[in-house]
Image: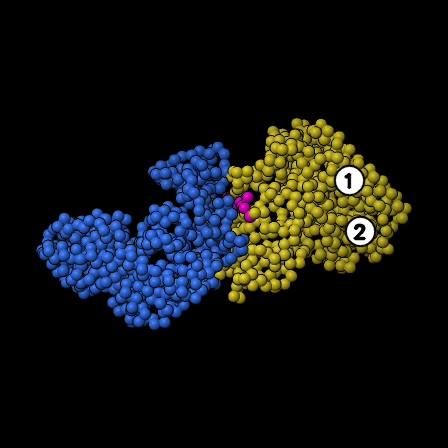
Chain colours: A yellow, B blue
Amino acid sequence: MIYMVGENVFTFNSGTEFSQMQRLKAFKRNGIEAKLLVRNYNRFLYRDASRAGLAKDDYINMYDYFQGVVGLERKKQELRLLDSIPLTKYHVVGIDNNLTTIDLLGRTIAKIAVMPETVGLVGSIDYFDRFGNKELTEFWDWRGFKSMEQNYNPDETVAAQKFFDRQEHVVLEIVHMNKNGKLAPTLWKLMNYHGHDYAFDSEDSLFLFFMNEITKTTPGLMISDRRTLDAPVKQVAHATGTIAYIHEGDLFIEGEGKKKVPNPIYDEALDEQKPFTAVFFATREQAKSLSGKWPHLTIKSSPDTFAEAQADNHSEPEHPHLTYIGRLFPDKHIADLIDAFEQVHQARPDAELFLKGYFSDDDYHHEITDKIHKKKLDDAIHLVNYSNDNHDILAKTTVFISAAKSEAFGMNSLEAMAAGVPVVAYGCLFLKNNLLINDQNGLAVDNMTPSNLGKAALSVLQDDQLYQRLQAGALKTATQHSEKAFVDEWKSGLSEFL
Amino acid sequence: MNYFINFGMPASKSGIEHAELKRKSLFDKHKEPYCFLLRDWSRDLHTNTANAGITDEHLINMFDYYQNTCHVDQVQLLPEEVDLGLKDLKYDDEYKRNRVLVSRADGRLAARINYVRETRQVVSTELFDGVENLYQVAFYDSRGFKSLIQWYTPDNKIGNEEWLTLDGRPVVKAFNKKGEDGKIKQTGWILTDRKGKRFQFDTIDAFFEHFINDVNESGENVFILDRSLLADEALIHLDKPAYTVMHLHNSHAGDAQRPMDSVMNNNYEYALVNGAKYSAFVSATKKQAVDVTKRFPYITKSFDIPVGIVPDDVLNRQRILSKNRIFGKVIAVARIAPEKNLDNLVRAIAIVHKQTPEVTLDLYGYPDATNNYAEKKKIEKTIKELSLEDVVTFKGYTENLESAYNTAQIFGLTSIMEGFDLSLLEAISHGVVGVTYDVNYGPNEIVEDGVNGYVTPYGDIKALAEKIQSLFADKDKMQQMSTNAYESAKRYSEENVWHKWQNLLQDAEKTEGGVAK
């Protein structure tokens, strides 16, 4: 068994989660037993995991496990059919699509928030005392059962959280108290787990306990994809081996005297005292470049992702469409994309740019929209909401464009190539010469400025012959990164640990 | 079912609890069903009720009811048996403080476990998180299970409280939050009832009303309210019909000497002005029953049923002659509280002491804590002022007064008012002669002036002293009155009192809605 260990399947996933889920699906399709173990509490997990294409037996969430609801199917719970509301005593009043109140003699004593994206299903209930203080919030899981409740201190900060099994027994408590002068969770306590209580000082020690329980019956190889989880994963008692898979291209930050030092987030992954069985990178080049630095570590490589086989449904748009898909975060240099596009737009006023993904935060969102507005490109640049499926947007894309200055692999570029879309990107390590071969499947811009990126994009748009050559190259690259090649490479990479 | 409503059954009982227990014995004897409905949570409740002779079949506590713990066998739970969820713990028994300190291997405090000294049964656990914040105090029922959890706030105050079922489901929750004045107080309750319905209450009184309605789900019960303020609102808002009885345990008037026009006793005001909404009122004396009807003519029924009952075996016991008692021994049995006015009795004894130096006064009763025991201090001052240190003795609260009643000659009473005075009845049933101020209600009915004792004008210390002295001076009169005291107790025999209860219960049967047994 191979356990892939992650924090969550998010509503908005990053490349790390995509990579993890792609790997899981490919392994399963190719007869390699694998499961995703996720740590975070997420009452929308069932929804988000199904949207990401996971089956319910593909993953085990820690909270689900202790709550006894792993694999539970969804049953819609209408808020108006809640057995817990005594309709003989209270009025249930619909306020709008998102809110219903419970009233007694004209006073609102509780508020029911409708489950997001649903009509009339219960999402959560807040209870209020006669002074309007919030006493308690009960949270429903997407699958339609009361999963958690939290109560509050007199200053309305969270006091304690309790997680329930289906019979509403408390199976886990999280206590929030002061730690180093700040309010934070300070205690996780399993209640009556197989007849005993277990107290933990951190969520990760609880997570370790969880992984030990899982692997006790079915031991396996653990792959940690998140650096936040390296410490507990390394300690799993029944692991047949432990692997840290590193998804980033650049592990270094500027230390004292402008010297490059490893970012401390990699301390556990690169620790030589208590090392992982092996540390994996996405490309041979990256593995090779680092193995000399940590001679006591077993450093290997296996691909981050593969190209899903696609039917050829590429339809050339009437006007050039440039597309970027990925996190809209500062480290992806979205502002560079706009500057580069401005240049394209001056030469080809009919060109459009599509930016698909989710922003790091509201500030960055505003910064980008302001920039678009100032450049009067509102009609030419379009922000597209995140979704799991990129087929449609890529089918209408002329060129995929990226301004990232660091990549471990470039999974979004591969996805574009698989759709027959050439890539124009900064020629950063470890994208260039791995996935992106200059002049074969796209253009790698070595001098990483928006102006050079714009020029390169324009050159592809203006030269039909070049465009067709790059398109053919892109499709060829995609076949080289097929699922079969991916699985084979993983099999050989893992062979000595299985 | 006949329900007796009270807040609890504490180890130190007041007259109301004693009256309830006597009623209980009477109902037991006549196989009349009854059940105590007790509102408040206490870890000792079942120990105290068992000690009072109340079995679990005759008891429903509100918290027990929803916690599903009405009937739980007691088990032993020792500090070392509490599951703290941690390994490698060190236990350090602080025997003198009735607790065990539990620490982790690295010395961090994990818990303090408090226990009952004699049995080492766990009382409570104070739990600490990894950075040694006290985050929870859990209280264990004397029957050996975790019952109440108090969660602590980061600034170390009691935040939220929860009561649990045996399998750990929190079914009753209380919240301590900021009120209208910004101060923290209990501001709300959430109940998950036996059917899984969730109710919210502003106060424990509203919660209790809900509970009484749950108990009265099928209707047709008798509710006897022994603590007016617990449920005087609830009983006039019942969802289903029931026979509701407001049992007066004290004067209905603030000044018992002016029963017709003085302000109403605050404890009964609401019930009295809403008197028409109750099925019946019960007073402990005929005199009060008459006064209540006169002043509140809209009250449907007014019964007089003594709260004191003299058991047959007491009535039939060998009588003790006054010459075989301790000469000069006077007793008083009353809380050391302002309304008991014991200072007057002490001053009367000072006068008697001049002529009868053998006189002694023993005061039985627990001191009222109001104003830091002001009343006890006041009496101590009087004793000192009158140099009666060797004459007057504080005996404290005791359940067993048998030997006091069998050796005393006189029972003194100088209260401002009474609802009955059980102790006085017990005293006359043991042949002790009562000398009392003329106060409503009880003393001036239990003591018949010139027959089994004397009733003197209220506040007349000298007259009281004279009557006491006259008894010490005339041994024949003392013996005659003692004999009459024994005889007069027959008015309160089980048979006579039961007959009065039967009248009420028959009325309940007849009343519309009926009464299911």
Give the left or right position of residue B434, taking residue A444 as reference. left
Give the left or right position of residue B179, taking residue A384 as reference. left
**Distance between mark 2 and mark 1 Cα atoms:** 19 Å
The image shows residue A318, relative to residue B50, as above or below, that is below
Residue A470, position in %: x, y? 86, 44
Q: Is residue B375 visible?
A: no
Residue B352, position in %: x, y? 12, 56
SS at mark 1 in the image: loop
Residue B278, position in %: x, y? 39, 66
User: Which contiguous range is marked in magenta?
Assistant: A168-180
Residue at 58% x, 36% y is A209
Q: Residues within 10 Å of mark 1 (few under 14, many from 20)?
A: many
Magenta segment includes A171: yes
Q: Which residue is mark 2?
A: A392
Magenta segment includes A33: no
The image shows residue A249, relative to residue B427, as above or below, that is above
Residue B404, position in %: x, y? 21, 49
Which of the image's four quarters has the N terminus of chain A? top right
Please tell me which of labels 2 and 1 falls first in the chain. 1
Give the residue type at disc 2: Asp
Assign the magenta stretch its main secondary structure.
strand
Query: Which of these two is toward me, A402 or B26?
Result: B26
Query: Which of these two is toward me, A435 or B352?
Result: B352
Q: Which residue is mark 1?
A: A306
Residue at 21% x, 47% y is B403
